[in-house]
Image (cartoon, rainbow, N blue to C red):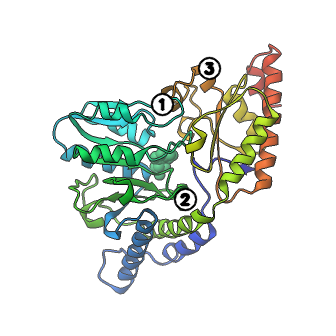
Amino acid sequence: MIDLDANATTALLPEVLDAMMPWLRGGHANPSGSYRAAKQARSAIDQARAQVADLVGANPEEIVFTGSGTESANTALHSLDQLAGPGHALVSAIEHSAVLRCAESLQREIRHVAVQGPGALDIADLERQLDGAAWISVMSANNETGVIQPLEEMAILARGRGIPLHTDAVQAAGKIPIDVRSLGVDLLSLSAHKIHGPKGVGALFVRGGLRFEALLKGGGQEGGRRSGTENTAGIVGMGAAAVLAKAHLAASRIAELRDAFESRVMAGLTGVTRNGDPSRRLPNTCHLSFDGCDAAGMLILLDEAGIACSAGSACMTGKQKPSHVQIAMGIPEARAKTSLRFSFSRLNTLSEAIEAADRVVRAATRLRSVQGSGVGPVVVYSPP
Ligand SMILES: Cc1ncc(COP(=O)(O)O)c(C=O)c1O
């Protein structure tokens, strides 16, 4: 299986597992305890906090560990919403459901920041909607198209009006350099499993001095900002993954693999459209529409051919609706239903990228011949 679904999740690196093992085998002490084993767990968590802080240019005290990227985003929005005065909230139309669904559940008017065709948020539209806004949540990079958002510009506008801003950096972290100070954000969400760390661990950057209201209340762990006994092994794993992600950033050749894959697919097939501004994409993400190839059929043929990838985002898989991201970008529904996301990780190789491209070309050619024959897509869904 060639895994081209890194935006859905990534494999745990052996170094990360090694760092976690002592805390899975025997290191079970509650980090809040007063005995030696507990203090060791506490200091391992503190080290991980410094490691995660270093990935995004934060101070360690500004990092709060959570149970996922979703929890991190929900915590951020809850805090913003509880502490803000009246007014609407601004979220982008292309947010992950962790932000969109959470925002919709709040007792506040939610307005959407529009996106331009190539997938970047429309700064002028944000500016138009700033009057009376209570808080803003806009993502750093989109999980489907990989388009990197003009966050710095948006943060300048927000700061100018004193409006707090959260960013979902779950996809951007570890793929492009992130610095919370130069971005000028107040809150920033991260997830361990997107950077070769364990699943079920996330982190929230909370700018020092920002007023904050916890979502999970209880024993007062994480400085009262996220109660619940800490997942020592998971947190240590996230710290180790953050160190490796930062070290790998400078030397990353991932864009070469993605570009080799993309150009080979586009050379091997007609009727392929690349979605998302190529000049501002995450280096690992490729989002393509294949004329005449229904995405559900492609996923089956590609699975059979040993390629893991996604139609839309992983969370949309199995649903027939085109993704809200593509619709917001103005991609016609018929084309949106033919789109696939291929996302690379540092574990992929160039020969895999080339082999994967050849398999994609074969799958699309086969699907087109069946669909074009008038037999209908139902044939494609049955096993060969
Ligand atoms: C942009 C974005 N935000 C948030 C999440 C949720 O992260 P987690 O799976 O850790 O809850 C994801 C996961 O796909 C994502 O892509």
What residue is drawn where x is 74% and y is 45%? 261
Tell me if residue 290 comes above or below residue 17 in the rendering: above
What residue is drawn where x is 40% and y is 82%? 40
* Residue 379 seen: yes
Q: Which residue is mark 1?
A: 116
Q: Mark 2 or mark 3, which is nearer the start of the sequence? A: 2
* Residue 305 seen: no
Q: Position of residue 55 (x, y in %)?
A: 46, 65
Q: Position of residue 298 (x, y in %)?
A: 72, 32
Residue at the farthest bottom position: 36
Q: Which mark is residue 334?
A: 3
- In three-dimensional space, the C-alpha distance between marks 3 and 2, rounded to whole angstroms, equals 33 Å
**Element at label 1:** loop
Instruction: Classify residue 315 as left or right of residue 34.
Output: right
**What crowding class fits label 2: few (fewer than 14 Cα within 10 Å), some (14-19), or many (20 or more)?**
many
**Element at label 3:** helix
Mark 1 or 3: the one toward you: 1
**What crowding class fits label 1: few (fewer than 14 Cα within 10 Å), some (14-19), or many (20 or more)?**
some
Q: Nearer the viewer, residue 52 or 10?
A: 52
Instruction: Classify residue 112 as left or right of residue 366.
Output: left
Mark 1 or 2: the one toward you: 1
Labels 1 and 3 touching (C-beta < 8 A):
no
Q: Which residue is mark 2?
A: 195
Q: Position of residue 314 (x, y in %)?
A: 57, 40
